[in-house]
Image (cartoon, rainbow, N blue to C red):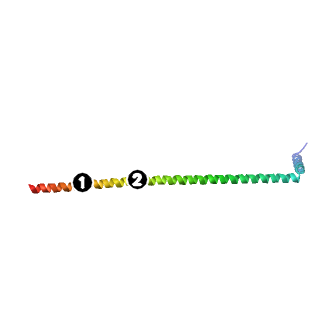
Amino acid sequence: MITGTDLALAITAVLIFSVLVGWCLHWLWVRMGMAAASPEEHIRDLVDRLHNADRAREEAEEARIRAESRLSAREAEMDNRMAAMQARLDGAIEGREAQLAQELREAKAELEAMEDGLRNARIRIAELEQAR
């Protein structure tokens, strides 16, 4: 019959053996994988990856330049729109000021006419009172 200690030692031994076998198989796998790829293939792969990275960088740079040009065009358009809106606003303000100035002149003219009429009426009343 197996005791608990014997069972624990057997399981420990199996686990240690499994780890060692796994490590050895991994080492063999890596060595075989490296042997299959020659240094020239590895260098070619690195060169291809470098060229792809350069192409991606150039495309990103071109995209940035296009985005900046679109942004500057949009800013110019917004500046033009803002100037047009300011001109319309200035024109509206000037028109309203001219209208109010005209209304003020008309009101002053009416006031002067009323004052003249009132003055003439007072003079006429004074003349009528003296003639009695």
SS class, disc 2: helix
Q: Position of residue 6 (x, y in %)?
A: 89, 47
Q: Residue at x 41, y 55 (%)?
A: 94
Amino acid type at mark 2? Gly
Q: Position of residue 131 (x, y in %)?
A: 9, 55
SS class, disc 1: helix
Q: Mark 1 and 2 residues: CB-CB less than 8 Å, in contact?
A: no
Does 16 sit left or right of 111 as displayed?
Answer: right
Residue named by callout 1: 114
Residue named by callout 2: 95
Q: Residue at x 31, y 53 (%)?
A: 106
Does 63 sit left or right of 126 as displayed?
Answer: right
Q: Decide: few, some or many residues near mark 1? Use Cα within 10 Å; few <14, some 14-19, many ≥20.
A: few
**Closer to us: 34 or 109:** 109
Q: Residue at x 59, y 53 (%)?
A: 73
Q: Residue furthest toward the top?
A: 1
Does 89 sit left or right of 58 as displayed?
Answer: left
Q: Position of residue 121 (x, y in %)?
A: 18, 54
